[in-house]
């Protein structure tokens, strides 16, 4: 519709859309004034009395990444259910399926964003750094990612960006000049003796070359891992920036290589590139199929030279059969260490009751929780230490 037609979107619906955009920005979605203006223009082209049309229109403008879709759906349902007078403007047309689901416990940050947005005046929201005391930081270290507020997520994101992975050295068979080496460099020694008429004055030595062990990360992006996926990607971006030999693959119902996308210098740009390259975000889980594709297409390319594999998944497989056990065994035999990081270990008394977890456990060297900052720091310590692979016993269901 041309801009010269004087049918501006004003009144209650415009105020609610602007307030909704402010709340989404507080909840973590990167929404600027341009997106708000586009949404107000789009209101002229749709039937604002149709709830489903309103949801779809605002989602197409405000949601630019897969991981933001769930937050938007929760926020839309909460905001327009509570907005005064909006119920009389929207009919009983049902929402899309993703907007009909009840908000999970992780929607705390959405509710908190609405509470903050009521006290904000003007179109812009200033972002302020959260100053934490020593006790607050200790609590934040142990708090589950899924239970954090928007401010806590922002603080954790900054902490993850500062994480550095020390170079876990892998001894090779190649040599380099080293003054403290144990092997005599006969060629350089004899060449140096030519300056002194054949007298050997200085002995040159060689030492073995140490290289950082390659790291291969397989990250589950299924619906059950939604509350953790973004922060795990932040962690993988941090260690990728510190070490160049890192390969990252995302899997849900299919396998996607996002190694090149995650090497972008800016974290937001890297995560946006990952989001745009994945088609099965927050969908189902097919671990066996994804591992089969990885072993066939990428195993020989990235698992050489003593690679360490990080499998980040809750292990809730839809098709737990003998294929899963076979592919896990194949992956385990192809790498130096296989570390399984499972958020479900945050629960005390966790037992391997799911069939998929029972099949996967015998084929991993370490089984670790990864659900808060403390567990991530423990993982960095485990990757730094050159520990020999150890077997773990499957915890059977009592």
Image (tube, rainbow, N blue to C red):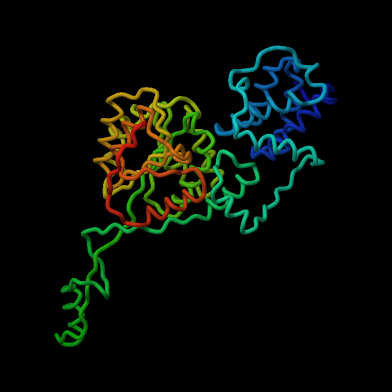
In the image, taking residue 179 as reference, residue 48 lies left or right, namely right
Which quadrant, please, contains the N terminus? top right
**In this rendering, is residue 154 above or below 177?**
above
- Tell me which residue sits at (16%, 87%) in the image: 197
Question: In the rendering, at what x and y percent does residue 275 appear?
Answer: 51, 35
Question: In the rendering, at what x and y percent does residue 213 appear?
Answer: 32, 53
**In this rendering, is residue 46 above or below 384?**
above
In the image, taking residue 98 as reference, residue 297 lies left or right, namely left
Q: Residue furthest top?
A: 92
Q: Residue furthest left?
A: 198
Image label count: 0
Decide which of 177, 324 is in the foreground and name it. 324
The answer to which image quadrant residue 381 occupies is bottom left
Decide which of 313, 29 is in the foreground and name it. 313
**In this rendering, is residue 134 above or below 220?**
below
The answer to which image quadrant residue 27 occupies is top right
Question: In the rendering, at what x and y percent does residue 206 appear?
Answer: 22, 70
- Tell me which residue sits at (37%, 53%) in the image: 383
Which quadrant, please, contains the C terminus? top left
In the image, taking residue 321 as reference, residue 282 lies left or right, namely right
In the image, taking residue 43 as reference, residue 225 lies left or right, namely left
Question: In the rendering, at what x and y percent does residue 12 appear?
Answer: 83, 25
The answer to which image quadrant residue 19 occupies is top right
Q: Residue furthest front?
A: 398
- Tell me which residue sits at (55%, 34%) in the image: 67
């Amino acid at each position: 519709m041309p801009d010269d037609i004087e049918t501006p979107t004003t009144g209650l619906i415009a105020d609610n859309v602007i307030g909704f955009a402010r709340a989404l920005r507080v909840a973590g979605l990167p929404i600027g004034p341009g997106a708000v203006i586009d949404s107000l223009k789009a209101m002229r082209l749709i039937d604002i009395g149709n709830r489903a049309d309103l949801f779809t229109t605002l989602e197409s403008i405000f949601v630019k990444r897969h991981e933001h879709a769930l937050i938007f759906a929760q926020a839309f349902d909460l905001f327009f259910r509570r907005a005064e007078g909006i119920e009389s403007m929207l009919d009983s047309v049902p929402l899309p399926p993703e907007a009909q689901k009840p908000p999970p416990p992780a929607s705390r940050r959405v509710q908190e964003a609405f509470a903050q947005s009521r006290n904000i005046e003007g179109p812009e929201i200033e972002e302020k750094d959260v100053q934490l005391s020593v006790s607050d930081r200790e609590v934040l270290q142990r708090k589950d990612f899924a239970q954090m507020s928007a401010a806590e997520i922002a603080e954790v994101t900054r902490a993850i960006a500062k994480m550095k992975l020390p170079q876990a050295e892998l001894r090779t068979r190649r040599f380099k000049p080293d003054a403290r080496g144990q092997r005599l460099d006969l060629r350089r020694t004899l060449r140096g003796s030519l300056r002194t008429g054949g007298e050997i004055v200085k002995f040159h030595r060689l030492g073995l070359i140490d290289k950082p062990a390659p790291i291969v990360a397989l990250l589950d992006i299924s619906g059950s891992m939604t509350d953790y996926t973004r922060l795990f990607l932040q962690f993988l971006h941090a260690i990728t920036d510190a070490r160049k030999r890192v390969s990252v693959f995302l899997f849900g119902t299919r396998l996607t290589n996002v190694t090149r996308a995650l090497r972008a210098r800016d974290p937001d740009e890297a995560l946006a590139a990952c989001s745009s390259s994945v088609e099965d975000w927050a969908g189902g889980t097919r671990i066996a199929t994804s591992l089969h594709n990885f072993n066939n297409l990428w195993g020989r390319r990235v698992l050489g030279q003593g690679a360490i594999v990080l499998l980040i998944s809750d292990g809730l497989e839809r098709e737990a059969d003998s294929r899963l056990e076979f592919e896990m065994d194949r992956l385990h035999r192809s790498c130096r260490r296989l570390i399984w990081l499972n958020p479900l270990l945050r629960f005390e008394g966790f037992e391997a009751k799911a069939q998929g977890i029972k099949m996967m456990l015998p084929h991993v060297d370490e089984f670790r929780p990864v659900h808060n900052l403390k567990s991530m720091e423990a993982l960095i310590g485990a990757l730094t230490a050159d520990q020999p692979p150890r077997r773990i016993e499957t915890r059977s269901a009592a």
